[in-house]
Amino acid sequence: MKRPTLEAVAARAGVSRSSVSRVVNGQDTVAPEIRDVVMRAVTELGYVPNGTARSLATRRTNAIAMIVSDPPGGVVADDPMFSAVVRTVSRELEAAGKRVTLILAGSPGSHLRVQEQLAAGHVDGAMLMSMHGADPLPAAVARMGVPVVTHGRPTMSVDLPYVDNDNVGGATLAVRYLLDQGRRRIATITGPLDMIAAQDRLTGYRETLRDTGRRSITAAGEFNRLSGAVCMRQLLDDDPALDAVFAANDLMAIGAMRALREAGRRVPDDVAVVGFDDIEAALYTAPPLTTVHSPMSDQARATARLLLGLLEGEPADSVTMPNELVVRESA
């Protein structure tokens, strides 16, 4: 059975081919009664628009690249927030009629393939996430003239619109809370410091302690459970008298709590623990984890909408979203 054509729909509806074309392409220059009769004919014939032909006519593919600029085994490998972001962004873009392509770009070869796809016009726009400071891909993409947004603030050397949460402010909330609870020797486990989020959370920690005249006690982690445990052991060796730790994400906080139990330290009696992100697992730790709630779904949704606006020629204003502290039993 032959696929119904635009001409067949026009004949069934008793209108011109151009009228049918305007209706199926979503143009608003068609009278309502014409639109109704065309859509009735489309339904009766089972007509499906030819995506390739439409792309040639509109010069749009309706495809969006979601580019994860993270090395193999990097921070997204063990991060439940990653799947939440991908799911939310995909739903938002697909609801707008866009097809989403997920690209893992963690090597020079994959970087080149991403640039080739963008240059060839295979996608209408792109969203970058999980960026590292030394990564050349964001700067290369920014020069290509394709609508691009970033999930998270990019490095200062790249001028791209973004949506982020207030990482400095969130860390400040956590450390101030620990100080208000009477904690005096507060350590931190940072994320990888080639990432802006980790840098900002460290800044919030340091500035808050500096205002009280206290010294920083730091260990560099990798945004995963194992590094949280390793760093916690290091911190206890360096300063056995510490009474609180702020981990720059919940996965590291969970690892830190395990290391504290193994060392015979009670949480929160001996050492209070605060994380960052408020992942679901934070509810089920023993004790439940006090953490900074990051509005990840809202951030992902806002990033998708920022890109959709760019595709329509709208101005792109970057957005920073506030956090809140969720107090549970670990601190």
Image: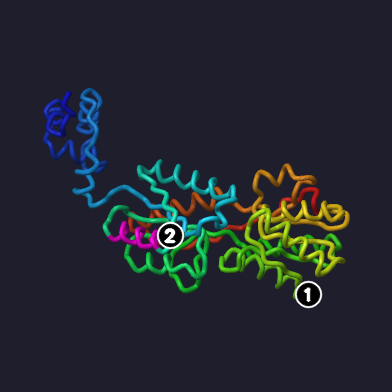
Q: Which mark is residue 20?
A: none
Q: Amino acid at mark 2?
A: Val
Magenta residues, start to end: 109-119
**Looking at this view, is 299 or 130 the one in front?**
130
Q: Quadrant of residue 53?
A: top left
User: Is 40 rendered above or below residue 245?
Assistant: above
Q: Tell me the crowding category of disc 1: few under 14, some 14 to 19, or many 20 or more residues within 10 angstroms, Cα based.
A: few
- Asked whether the beta carbons under mark 1 and mark 2 sit within 8 Å of each other, the answer is no
Q: Tell me where residue 154 appears, x and y as whole percent.
A: 49, 66
Residue at which label 2 appears: 149
From the viewer's perspective, tell me whether residue 217 is left or right of residue 140. Answer: right
Q: Residue at x 75, y 49 (%)?
A: 289
From the viewer's perspective, tell me whether residue 195 is left or right of residue 31. Answer: right
Residue at which label 1 appears: 215
| Residue 61 inside the magenta-drawn segment | no
Q: Residue at x 76, y 65 (%)?
A: 234
Q: Secondary structure at mark 2?
A: strand
| Residue 112 inside the magenta-drawn segment | yes
